[in-house]
Amino acid sequence: MKKVSFCGISGSGMSSLAQVLALSGVEVQGSDRNFDLGRDWANKEAFEKMGIRIVPQDGSAITPDLDFVCASTAVEDTIADVRAAKEKNVPIKTRPELLAEVFHSYKYGIAVGGTSGKTTTTAMVGYILDKAGKKPCMINGGLLKDYEGQYAIPNIIFNKGDICVVEADESNGSINLYNPTVSVITNISADHKSLDELVELFQALADRTEKQVIINDDYNLCKKIKSEHLCSFSLKNPDADFYASDIKPLPNGTSYVLSGKTFTLKLIGAFNVANALAAIAACAEFGVDRFTAAEILQDFSGTKRRLEVIGVKKGVTVIDDFAHNPDKVKASLSALKQYRGRLIVMFQPHGFGPMRSLGKEIMAEFVQGLHGEDILLMPEIFFVGGTVTKDISSADLITQARVLGKANAYFYPTREEVEAFILRNAREGDRVVIMGARDNSLTDFCRDILEKL
């Protein structure tokens, strides 16, 4: 592999792979329609600083000397780079195919799957192994706060060792491409696929796992997974292999007891303790003692956009969060409700298909998790182009929320209108939470709100 072009390079999954290849000595170039539209300039500049050439997404940079074009699953066959590759007989690989190829080039592989929590758990595994001197390569979707400035985009940990840690995505079926040494199943709950399909996917992952299969004992569907090398973690069952008790919220994190010793996390929410247990269990297979791993995690700052506090101004806290499916929304709201203050939540859906299948369940979690004066706001569904059926609107979801009993739920067509509402209504003690996925500009939106408060 000598020269590769990425189509959709600014995406969280594509950018991590592009950087790993570049750091491995491959000549890398890439295009992204966000760059062509004048967005994501920070990513563009960061890529160029590390030697990745950014090209227009018009097909002009697709040349016969490329080993292949790696195309994001988010781009269509009509994209100029993809058309040019086909016309010039340049091979095309999808991101999942390339990720699996990189994953299997290492002696040992850890695949972290689950319908929620896998990004943070993957980051925790990589962080523990890195700080323990195990020299992992970690490829993730989320941005690691502890590695900002070390890489162009901090969604990787790169060492020339023999362990590769990846976030294994079940939503597009690409989890079927991995044959790991160790697999982690953080949970199984409603997401992009039916529950029966999810159980089948994760069982198949367990069947392909060479050594340990780590499951969350607190989810009934996880208990359906069978393996000769099963390892469990739990916040409820003291008989689990890794069990945490006495979970308590702290002003800036969480404390818990593991095997008789108390540890802390800089992250809020019991669900992050579960993520920590999963990571500790995975690292134990590679010789990291559970107490050593827990001690290392006390310094872990987390991943960006996972209940990330952007700042506080005039007594109002602005928080950025990636929650976008029922389980993630439930977990985030549960963690936030451990602390005082009214919640003003903006949820920006990221797909028409997901909202058709999960919209009602997501609204049910908002209705259940938001109390009293808490407010739910929604702009229109996020859309960056392509061919989709636009037969559902955020207005429909707000109507569902109101039918379910949430009176102070409001639809505004644009984010600018949502922002205006927040600035008019936010008061001292409030937490403003911006939720949504697949839109890199949401963090900038948070910063804009903070600045204008």
Image (cartoon, rainbow, N blue to C red):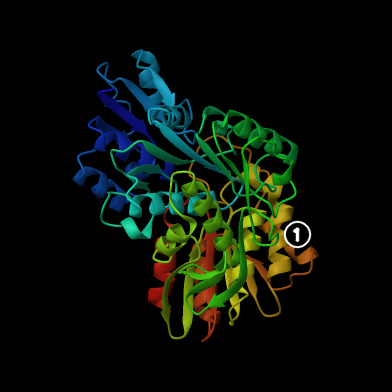
Residue 134 visible (yes or no):
yes
Q: Position of residue 315 (x, y in %)?
A: 47, 85
Image location (x, y in percent) of residue 222: 69, 45
Q: Is residue 51 left or right of residue 241?
A: left
Residue closer to the observer: 52 or 132: 132
The image quarter in which residue 245 lies? bottom right
Q: How many labels, in total?
A: 1
| Mark 1, residue position | 400
Q: Residue at x 31, y 38 (%)?
A: 161
Q: Amino acid at mark 1?
A: Gln
In the displayed structure, would residue 428 be above or below residue 254?
below
Along the line of sight, the residue nearer the viewer: 100 or 328? 100
The residue shown at (63%, 30%) is 207
Q: Is residue 116 above or below residue 453?
A: above
201 over 251 or under it: above or below? above
Of the 4 image quadrants, the one containing the N terminus is top left
Residue 54 visible within the image: no
Nearest the eye: 424 or 324? 324
User: Left of 216 or right of it: where is 16?
Assistant: left
Residue at 38% in and 49% down: 155
> In the picture shown, does residue 180 fall above or below 403?
above
Circle 1: element type: helix
User: Residue at horizontal 45%, vertical 40%?
Assistant: 166
**Mark 1: few, some, or many residues within 10 Å (few <14, many ≥20)?**
some
Location of residue 289 in the rendering, given as x and y in whole percent from the top left corner: 45, 54
Quadrant of residue 453 within the rendered picture: bottom left
